Amino acid sequence: MASEVNLNRLAVFVALVRAGSFTAAAETLGMTKAMVSQHVARLERELGVTLLLRSTRRMTLTEAGNTFHAACVRILAEAEAAIEQVGRSQEMPSGTLRLTATGDYGTPVVAPALAQFMRMHPQLQVDLVLTDHVSDLIAERFDLAIRMGRLRDSDLRSARLGGFRQLVVASPAYLARHAAPRTLGDLATHDWVALTLLSSPLRWTFNAPDGSRRTVRVRPVAQANNVAAARALVLHGAGVSILPDYLVTDDVREGRLVVLLAQYALPECGIYAVYPGRQPSAKVRAFIDYLREFLSPGT
Protein backbone atom coordinates (compact mmCIF):
# COMPACT_ATOMS: atom_id res chain seq x y z
CA MET A 1 0.00 0.00 0.00
CA ALA A 2 1.20 3.56 -0.73
CA SER A 3 0.75 4.54 2.91
CA GLU A 4 3.49 2.03 3.79
CA VAL A 5 6.11 3.44 1.40
CA ASN A 6 9.57 3.84 2.91
CA LEU A 7 10.43 7.44 2.04
CA ASN A 8 14.17 6.74 2.13
CA ARG A 9 13.74 4.75 -1.08
CA LEU A 10 12.72 7.94 -2.88
CA ALA A 11 16.28 9.25 -2.61
CA VAL A 12 17.66 5.96 -3.93
CA PHE A 13 15.25 6.06 -6.88
CA VAL A 14 16.16 9.66 -7.77
CA ALA A 15 19.88 8.89 -7.49
CA LEU A 16 19.44 5.88 -9.78
CA VAL A 17 17.68 7.91 -12.46
CA ARG A 18 20.30 10.67 -12.19
CA ALA A 19 23.21 8.19 -12.41
CA GLY A 20 21.68 6.25 -15.31
CA SER A 21 22.68 2.80 -14.09
CA PHE A 22 22.59 0.63 -11.00
CA THR A 23 26.39 0.44 -10.90
CA ALA A 24 26.86 4.22 -11.04
CA ALA A 25 24.08 4.78 -8.50
CA ALA A 26 25.67 2.29 -6.10
CA GLU A 27 28.97 4.18 -6.29
CA THR A 28 27.23 7.51 -5.69
CA LEU A 29 25.20 6.23 -2.73
CA GLY A 30 28.00 4.19 -1.17
CA MET A 31 26.07 0.93 -1.24
CA THR A 32 26.18 -2.26 -3.30
CA LYS A 33 24.49 -2.64 -6.68
CA ALA A 34 22.33 -5.38 -5.17
CA MET A 35 21.11 -3.04 -2.42
CA VAL A 36 20.13 -0.36 -4.96
CA SER A 37 18.22 -2.96 -6.98
CA GLN A 38 16.57 -4.23 -3.80
CA HIS A 39 15.44 -0.72 -2.74
CA VAL A 40 13.88 -0.03 -6.15
CA ALA A 41 12.15 -3.41 -6.27
CA ARG A 42 10.66 -2.86 -2.81
CA LEU A 43 9.59 0.66 -3.75
CA GLU A 44 7.73 -0.71 -6.75
CA ARG A 45 6.02 -3.31 -4.53
CA GLU A 46 5.08 -0.64 -1.97
CA LEU A 47 3.65 1.60 -4.69
CA GLY A 48 2.06 -1.23 -6.65
CA VAL A 49 3.43 0.07 -9.98
CA THR A 50 6.40 -0.57 -12.25
CA LEU A 51 8.79 2.36 -12.30
CA LEU A 52 11.60 0.98 -14.44
CA LEU A 53 11.89 -1.36 -17.41
CA ARG A 54 15.24 -3.16 -17.19
CA SER A 55 17.27 -5.01 -19.76
CA THR A 56 20.84 -6.28 -19.76
CA ARG A 57 22.04 -3.07 -21.42
CA ARG A 58 19.73 -0.27 -20.32
CA MET A 59 16.90 0.83 -18.08
CA THR A 60 13.92 2.98 -19.06
CA LEU A 61 11.39 4.84 -16.96
CA THR A 62 7.78 3.85 -17.42
CA GLU A 63 5.16 6.57 -17.73
CA ALA A 64 4.31 6.10 -14.04
CA GLY A 65 8.04 6.10 -13.24
CA ASN A 66 8.60 9.35 -15.12
CA THR A 67 5.73 11.08 -13.28
CA PHE A 68 6.83 9.68 -9.94
CA HIS A 69 10.44 10.73 -10.54
CA ALA A 70 9.43 14.35 -11.16
CA ALA A 71 7.41 14.36 -7.92
CA CYS A 72 10.30 12.80 -5.97
CA VAL A 73 12.76 15.44 -7.23
CA ARG A 74 10.40 18.17 -6.05
CA ILE A 75 9.82 16.51 -2.65
CA LEU A 76 13.53 16.02 -1.98
CA ALA A 77 14.32 19.59 -3.05
CA GLU A 78 11.68 20.92 -0.66
CA ALA A 79 13.05 18.73 2.14
CA GLU A 80 16.59 20.00 1.53
CA ALA A 81 15.35 23.60 1.53
CA ALA A 82 13.50 23.02 4.83
CA ILE A 83 16.61 21.50 6.41
CA GLU A 84 18.74 24.41 5.17
CA GLN A 85 16.24 26.93 6.52
CA VAL A 86 16.23 25.28 9.95
CA GLY A 87 20.02 25.30 9.90
CA ARG A 88 20.09 29.01 9.11
CA SER A 89 17.64 29.72 11.94
CA GLN A 90 20.08 28.04 14.30
CA GLU A 91 22.91 30.26 13.08
CA MET A 92 21.28 33.67 12.53
CA PRO A 93 18.58 35.39 14.63
CA SER A 94 15.42 35.63 12.54
CA GLY A 95 11.64 35.42 12.78
CA THR A 96 9.79 36.68 15.87
CA LEU A 97 11.28 36.67 19.36
CA ARG A 98 8.34 36.28 21.76
CA LEU A 99 9.33 36.91 25.36
CA THR A 100 7.80 37.83 28.68
CA ALA A 101 8.97 39.77 31.74
CA THR A 102 7.47 41.51 34.75
CA GLY A 103 6.22 45.03 34.18
CA ASP A 104 8.59 46.63 36.69
CA TYR A 105 11.66 45.07 35.01
CA GLY A 106 10.43 44.83 31.45
CA THR A 107 9.70 48.53 31.04
CA PRO A 108 12.94 50.12 32.35
CA VAL A 109 15.39 47.34 31.39
CA VAL A 110 14.18 44.69 28.93
CA ALA A 111 12.44 47.07 26.50
CA PRO A 112 15.47 49.40 26.07
CA ALA A 113 17.74 46.36 25.63
CA LEU A 114 15.37 44.94 23.02
CA ALA A 115 15.33 48.21 21.09
CA GLN A 116 19.11 48.15 20.78
CA PHE A 117 19.13 44.42 19.99
CA MET A 118 16.63 44.94 17.16
CA ARG A 119 18.86 47.58 15.59
CA MET A 120 21.62 44.97 15.50
CA HIS A 121 19.28 42.39 13.93
CA PRO A 122 16.85 44.26 11.65
CA GLN A 123 15.48 40.98 10.26
CA LEU A 124 14.11 40.11 13.71
CA GLN A 125 10.68 41.04 15.06
CA VAL A 126 9.84 41.21 18.77
CA ASP A 127 6.70 40.43 20.79
CA LEU A 128 7.20 41.57 24.42
CA VAL A 129 4.51 40.59 26.93
CA LEU A 130 4.68 42.19 30.39
CA THR A 131 2.89 40.36 33.19
CA ASP A 132 3.40 39.72 36.89
CA HIS A 133 2.14 36.14 36.73
CA VAL A 134 4.46 33.24 35.90
CA SER A 135 3.64 32.35 32.30
CA ASP A 136 3.58 28.83 30.91
CA LEU A 137 6.21 29.24 28.22
CA ILE A 138 5.17 26.19 26.22
CA ALA A 139 1.39 26.67 26.39
CA GLU A 140 1.67 30.41 25.68
CA ARG A 141 4.31 29.89 22.97
CA PHE A 142 7.03 32.06 24.52
CA ASP A 143 10.62 31.70 23.32
CA LEU A 144 11.99 33.22 26.50
CA ALA A 145 11.10 34.63 29.92
CA ILE A 146 13.11 37.03 32.08
CA ARG A 147 12.53 36.05 35.71
CA MET A 148 13.72 37.55 38.95
CA GLY A 149 14.71 36.15 42.32
CA ARG A 150 14.60 32.46 43.10
CA LEU A 151 13.59 30.14 40.26
CA ARG A 152 10.95 27.50 40.69
CA ASP A 153 11.89 23.91 39.92
CA SER A 154 10.83 23.02 36.39
CA ASP A 155 11.88 21.27 33.20
CA LEU A 156 12.84 24.62 31.67
CA ARG A 157 16.42 25.65 31.01
CA SER A 158 17.83 28.83 32.54
CA ALA A 159 20.83 31.12 32.24
CA ARG A 160 21.84 33.64 34.89
CA LEU A 161 22.09 37.14 33.44
CA GLY A 162 23.07 39.10 36.52
CA GLY A 163 21.66 40.22 39.82
CA PHE A 164 20.10 43.16 41.63
CA ARG A 165 20.15 44.61 45.13
CA GLN A 166 17.16 45.30 47.31
CA LEU A 167 17.19 48.71 48.99
CA VAL A 168 15.30 50.12 51.97
CA VAL A 169 13.90 53.44 50.74
CA ALA A 170 11.57 56.27 51.71
CA SER A 171 10.70 59.67 50.27
CA PRO A 172 12.02 62.96 51.72
CA ALA A 173 8.40 63.94 52.41
CA TYR A 174 7.88 60.84 54.58
CA LEU A 175 11.20 61.39 56.40
CA ALA A 176 10.19 64.98 57.12
CA ARG A 177 7.31 63.59 59.19
CA HIS A 178 9.14 60.58 60.68
CA ALA A 179 12.70 60.38 61.97
CA ALA A 180 14.85 58.17 59.76
CA PRO A 181 15.50 54.71 61.28
CA ARG A 182 18.94 54.33 62.84
CA THR A 183 18.76 50.59 63.55
CA LEU A 184 16.96 47.63 62.01
CA GLY A 185 14.74 47.52 65.07
CA ASP A 186 13.50 51.02 64.24
CA LEU A 187 11.90 49.67 61.04
CA ALA A 188 9.23 47.97 63.13
CA THR A 189 7.97 51.41 64.24
CA HIS A 190 7.68 52.84 60.72
CA ASP A 191 4.78 52.78 58.28
CA TRP A 192 5.50 50.03 55.77
CA VAL A 193 4.43 49.55 52.17
CA ALA A 194 4.23 45.79 51.62
CA LEU A 195 4.56 43.94 48.33
CA THR A 196 2.03 41.12 48.47
CA LEU A 197 3.50 39.05 45.63
CA LEU A 198 6.39 38.11 47.94
CA SER A 199 6.16 34.93 50.02
CA SER A 200 6.93 36.80 53.27
CA PRO A 201 6.45 40.55 52.66
CA LEU A 202 6.58 41.51 56.35
CA ARG A 203 9.67 39.58 57.43
CA TRP A 204 13.15 40.54 56.24
CA THR A 205 16.58 39.11 57.10
CA PHE A 206 19.58 41.42 56.68
CA ASN A 207 23.32 40.83 56.68
CA ALA A 208 24.93 43.09 59.28
CA PRO A 209 28.38 44.68 58.90
CA ASP A 210 29.83 42.21 61.44
CA GLY A 211 28.70 39.26 59.32
CA SER A 212 25.71 38.31 61.47
CA ARG A 213 22.17 37.94 60.16
CA ARG A 214 19.33 39.90 61.70
CA THR A 215 15.62 39.53 61.07
CA VAL A 216 13.03 42.27 61.45
CA ARG A 217 9.24 42.24 61.18
CA VAL A 218 7.46 45.32 59.87
CA ARG A 219 3.98 46.80 60.21
CA PRO A 220 2.12 47.51 56.95
CA VAL A 221 -0.07 50.55 56.41
CA ALA A 222 -0.41 49.89 52.68
CA GLN A 223 0.17 47.01 50.33
CA ALA A 224 0.35 46.47 46.57
CA ASN A 225 0.58 43.42 44.33
CA ASN A 226 2.88 45.16 41.86
CA VAL A 227 6.39 46.58 42.37
CA ALA A 228 5.71 49.70 40.31
CA ALA A 229 2.62 50.43 42.40
CA ALA A 230 4.61 49.98 45.63
CA ARG A 231 7.21 52.41 44.30
CA ALA A 232 4.50 54.97 43.53
CA LEU A 233 3.15 54.69 47.09
CA VAL A 234 6.64 55.19 48.54
CA LEU A 235 7.38 58.13 46.22
CA HIS A 236 4.25 59.87 47.44
CA GLY A 237 5.15 59.49 51.10
CA ALA A 238 3.00 56.50 52.14
CA GLY A 239 5.82 54.80 53.98
CA VAL A 240 9.05 52.81 53.87
CA SER A 241 9.59 49.81 51.62
CA ILE A 242 12.22 47.54 50.08
CA LEU A 243 12.50 48.00 46.33
CA PRO A 244 14.88 46.68 43.64
CA ASP A 245 17.80 48.91 42.69
CA TYR A 246 17.00 48.82 38.96
CA LEU A 247 13.69 50.53 39.70
CA VAL A 248 14.86 53.23 42.13
CA THR A 249 18.42 54.12 41.09
CA ASP A 250 17.29 57.24 39.23
CA ASP A 251 14.95 58.20 42.10
CA VAL A 252 17.82 58.01 44.59
CA ARG A 253 20.23 59.90 42.35
CA GLU A 254 17.72 62.69 41.73
CA GLY A 255 16.65 62.94 45.38
CA ARG A 256 13.11 61.59 45.06
CA LEU A 257 13.96 58.67 47.36
CA VAL A 258 16.49 58.16 50.15
CA VAL A 259 18.28 54.87 50.89
CA LEU A 260 18.01 53.93 54.56
CA LEU A 261 20.26 51.70 56.68
CA ALA A 262 22.71 51.23 53.81
CA GLN A 263 25.16 49.48 56.17
CA TYR A 264 22.80 46.48 56.23
CA ALA A 265 22.45 44.37 53.10
CA LEU A 266 19.81 41.97 51.85
CA PRO A 267 20.90 38.94 49.77
CA GLU A 268 21.39 39.75 46.09
CA CYS A 269 18.63 38.43 43.85
CA GLY A 270 19.28 36.74 40.53
CA ILE A 271 18.06 37.75 37.07
CA TYR A 272 17.52 34.76 34.79
CA ALA A 273 16.63 33.98 31.21
CA VAL A 274 14.38 30.93 31.12
CA TYR A 275 13.54 29.03 27.95
CA PRO A 276 11.95 25.72 26.90
CA GLY A 277 13.77 23.00 25.00
CA ARG A 278 17.24 21.53 25.28
CA GLN A 279 18.86 23.86 22.76
CA PRO A 280 17.98 27.56 22.46
CA SER A 281 17.39 28.94 18.98
CA ALA A 282 19.78 31.48 17.50
CA LYS A 283 17.48 34.40 18.36
CA VAL A 284 17.16 33.27 21.99
CA ARG A 285 20.86 32.54 22.34
CA ALA A 286 21.81 35.90 20.80
CA PHE A 287 19.46 37.89 23.04
CA ILE A 288 20.63 36.09 26.18
CA ASP A 289 24.24 36.95 25.30
CA TYR A 290 23.31 40.54 24.50
CA LEU A 291 21.24 41.07 27.66
CA ARG A 292 23.99 39.62 29.82
CA GLU A 293 26.41 42.15 28.31
CA PHE A 294 23.80 44.94 28.57
CA LEU A 295 23.46 44.27 32.30
CA SER A 296 27.19 44.08 32.97
CA PRO A 297 28.53 46.93 35.11
CA GLY A 298 30.16 49.66 33.06
CA THR A 299 28.35 48.88 29.80
Image: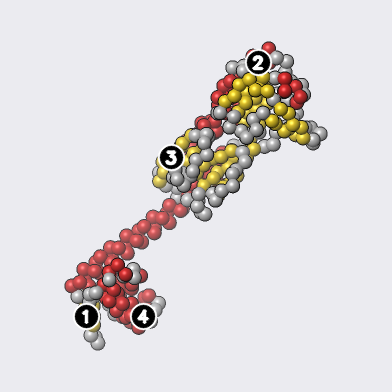
Circles 3 and 4: CB atoms closer than 8 Å: no
Q: What amino acid is at disc 1? A: Leu
Q: Is residue 207 left or right of residue 37?
A: right
Q: Counting residues from the N terminus, which is met first, the one under dot 2 or under dot 4?
A: 4
Quarter of the image that includes the C terminus: top right
Quadrant in the rendering for residue 25: bottom left
Quarter of the image that includes the N terminus: bottom left
Q: Position of residue 189 (x, y in %)?
A: 72, 20
Q: Residue at x 31, y 70 (%)?
A: 5
Residue projecting furthest to the left: 63
Q: Is residue 255 left or right of residue 189?
A: left
Look at discs 2 and 4 and give the one toward the viewer.
2
Disc 2 secondary structure class: helix
Q: Position of residue 43 (x, y in %)?
A: 29, 74
Q: What amino acid is at disc 3? A: Val
Q: Is residue 60 left or right of residue 251?
A: left
Residue under label 4, please give it: 35
Q: Position of residue 281 (x, y in %)?
A: 47, 51
Look at discs 3 and 2 and give the one toward the viewer.
2
Q: Within 10 Å of the Cα at label 4, are there few (<14), some (14-19), or many (20+) other Cα atoms? A: few
Q: Residue at x 64, y 14 (%)?
A: 173
Which mark is drawn over residue 242?
none
Q: Residue at x 63, y 20 (%)?
A: 221
Residue under label 3, please give it: 126
Residue under label 1, please give it: 53
Q: Counting residues from the N terminus, which is met first, the one under dot 4 or under dot 1?
A: 4
* Image: 270 above or below 16: above
Q: Counting residues from the N terminus, which is met first, the one under dot 1 or under dot 2?
A: 1
Circles 3 and 2: CB atoms closer than 8 Å: no
Inter-mark Cα distance, 4 to 1: 18 Å
Circles 2 and 4: CB atoms closer than 8 Å: no
